[in-house]
């Protein structure tokens, strides 16, 4: 069982990622930290605590992270996730008082006191992870791996070249990929292939427990914001992109993905490529292969993992 801290910005697909981490027998979820991204920091913090209340896992500590990116003003994705960050379903109010400890201090305390190495999974902007790496270099050796959702080799979803999570805080992403820690990146090249369809939402709803029904409601809303490719014709059906669960699913079962070591650099300059992850796909530069980059997902098995996650919460 892998010791894990999940850094997230819930967010509909973050919700599925969090529930997946809770349900897996291969993950010991030590803590949840929250970043600003899909919504403002106070909302993502509240959403994480609401999801833990929904899952009846209030014993898992939650801490709020940085309120804004390292060097930039915050950009949020309200047009995708709604005014609350989790529009589309009624969630229970948090049942545990907000902790006063910061995300950085909580991560440091856990790693410092852990006898085993800890995996960090990040499904939002990488601000909190970067702050931790900068402030506690002595604890870097306690990190087993950083698995994050973000970036793309081919094309972006926020700008022509940049994926949203990396665009929000490119300086943080730059620190993470240069950290020397084992890093796995699940960008749009693979996450756009990790799709659920309307029939899957219905199957989730029919599982019948409170978590599954709530998740189905959230997915119904999320489905409304799914981007259909420009080349699609009237016969094309685009599913719901389960971006964030990919970073968790890889930690649960790496065989679900085809992942290749490559050199990755992050563009931080003020230009049209700001926030892009420059993936040396053909090893043109011959530089150190510092990131394992995901490109393919076994969709039937990924979908099975989603369904198993929902069934875990049966009473």
Image: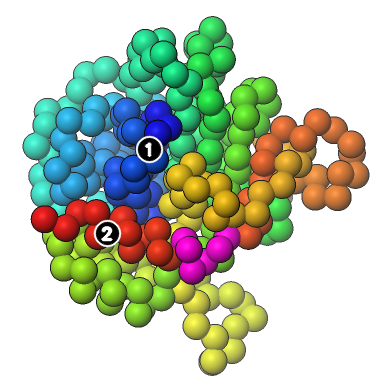
Say which element carries label 1: strand
Look at the image and say whether residue 100 sits in the magenta stretch: no
The answer to whether 138 is drawn above or below residue 251 in the figure is: above
Q: Earlier in the sequence, mark 2 or mark 1?
A: 1
Q: Which residue occupies 15% across, 62% down?
A: 209
Quadrant holding the C terminus? bottom left
Tell me if I can see residue 95 in this picture. Answer: yes
Please provide percent x and percent y for residue 93: 10, 44
Is residue 115 toward the left or the right of residue 177 in the image? left
In three-dimensional space, the C-alpha distance between marks 2 and 1, rounded to whole angstroms, equals 16 Å
Foreground residue among 141 and 93 = 141
The answer to whether 304 is drawn above or below residue 197 in the figure is: above
Q: Which residue occupies 86% across, 44% down?
A: 283
Residue wearing tag 1: 27
The answer to whether 215 is drawn above or below residue 70 in the figure is: below
- Residue 53 quadrant: top left
Foreground residue among 156 and 311 = 311
Q: Which residue occupies 40% across, 29% down?
A: 3
Tell me which segment is drawn in magenta. 297-302
Foreground residue among 74 and 291 = 291
Please provide percent x and percent y for residue 174: 64, 31
Please provide percent x and percent y for residue 68: 42, 31
Residue farthest along the top direction in this orientation: 138
Q: Which residue occupies 27% across, 69% down?
A: 204
Residue wearing tag 2: 310
Is residue 192 toward the left or the right of residue 207 in the image? right
Q: Main secondary structure of the magenta part?
A: helix
Look at the image and say whether residue 301 sits in the magenta stretch: yes
C-beta proximity under 8 Å, tags 2 and 1? no
- Residue 113 quadrant: top left
């Amino acid at each position: 069982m892998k010791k894990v801290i999940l850094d997230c910005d819930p967010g509909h697909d973050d919700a599925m990622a969090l529930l997946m981490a809770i349900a897996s027998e291969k993950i010991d979820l030590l803590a949840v930290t929250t970043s600003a991204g899909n919504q403002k920091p106070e909302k993502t913090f509240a959403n994480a605590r609401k999801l833990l209340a929904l899952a009846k896992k209030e014993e898992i500590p939650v801490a709020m992270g940085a309120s804004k990116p390292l060097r930039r003003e915050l950009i949020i994705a309200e047009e995708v996730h709604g005014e609350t960050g989790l529009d589309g379903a009624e969630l229970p109010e948090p049942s545990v008082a907000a902790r006063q400890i910061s995300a950085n201090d909580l991560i440091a305390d856990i790693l410092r006191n852990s006898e085993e190495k800890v995996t960090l999974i990040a499904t939002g902007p990488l601000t909190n992870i970067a702050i931790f790496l900068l402030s506690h270099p002595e604890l870097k050796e306690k990190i087993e791996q950083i698995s994050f959702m973000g970036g793309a080799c081919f094309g972006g979803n926020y700008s022509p070249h940049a994926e949203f999570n990396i665009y929000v805080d490119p300086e943080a992403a730059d620190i993470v990929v240069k950290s020397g820690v084992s890093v796995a990146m699940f960008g749009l090249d693979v996450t756009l292939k990790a799709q659920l369809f309307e029939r899957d939402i219905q199957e989730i709803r029919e599982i019948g427990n409170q978590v599954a029904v709530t998740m189905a409601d959230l997915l119904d809303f999320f489905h409304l914001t799914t981007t259909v490719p420009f080349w699609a014709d009237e016969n094309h059906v685009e599913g719901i992109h389960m971006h964030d669960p990919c970073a968790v699913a890889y930690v649960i079962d790496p065989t679900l993905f085809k992942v290749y070591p490559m050199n990755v650099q992050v563009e931080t300059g003020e230009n049209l490529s700001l926030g892009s992850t420059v993936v040396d796909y053909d090893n043109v530069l011959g530089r150190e292969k510092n990131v394992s980059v995901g490109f393919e997902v076994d969709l039937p098995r990924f979908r099975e993992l989603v369904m198993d996650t929902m069934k875990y919460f049966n009473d």
